[in-house]
Image: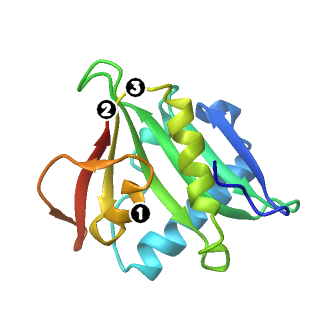
Amino acid sequence: MPQLPDDLRLRSARGIDDLPARTLYRIARLRQEVFVVEQACAYPDLDGRDLEPTTTQIWAENASGEIAATLRVLDERHREPGLRSVGRVVTAPAWRGRGVAAALLEAAIAQCAGGPILIHAQAHLAAWYGRFGFAACGEEFLEDGIPHLPMRIG
């Protein structure tokens, strides 16, 4: 399992009520900085899925609460029994290339306890997700102007 840098700790919260307000703000801000500003995608990041009681946020933070990377795990059993999805995988620029996202993704996979997991990966990251056992399960598509590929485990 990938290890976090020593100055980071892995955290998680199931449901928004277990997520401290300042942490939620920092997570939303990082997602906005990367997806909306850096990647120039104007889209509704706050889509209501973070409010679902079964949504789990997983993040890495330093001692001062700065978010290095984050992702969310959604319950998708309405689509398929036991299905979960991983999304909003994002790493702050200063922490890229240091194994932080890999450690979070491993934690998310472990949390799904061997059940099927779906991800809509940015296409240029398909090989990276493949290292964790994800395989393409459909055709490439454009989402907010960025090529994505549906991938899954199980």
Residue 42 pos. (x, y %): 33, 71
Q: Residue at x 43, y 35 (%)?
A: 74
Disc marking residue 27: none
Numbered label tally:
3
Q: Quadrant of residue 140?
A: bottom left
Q: Assess disc 3: are there few (<14), some (14-19) or many (≥20) residues with their C-alpha within 10 Å of its C-alpha.
A: some
Tag 1 residue? 128
Earlier in the chain: of badge 3 and badge 1, it is 3
Residue 69 pos. (x, y %): 62, 61
Q: CA distance from mark 1 to mark 2?
A: 17 Å
Front in this rendered view, residue 13 or 21 = 13
Front in this rendered view, residue 48 or 136 = 136
Type of the residue with mark 3: Gly
Earlier in the chain: of badge 2 and badge 3, it is 3
Left or right: 86 in relation to 151: right
Badge 1 marks a residue whose secondary structure is helix
Tag 3 residue? 115
Disc marking residue 154: 2
Badge 3 marks a residue whose secondary structure is loop
Type of the residue with mark 1: Trp
Q: Residue at x 50, y 33 (%)?
A: 55
Badge 2 marks a residue whose secondary structure is loop
Q: Residue at x 27, y 22 (%)?
A: 78
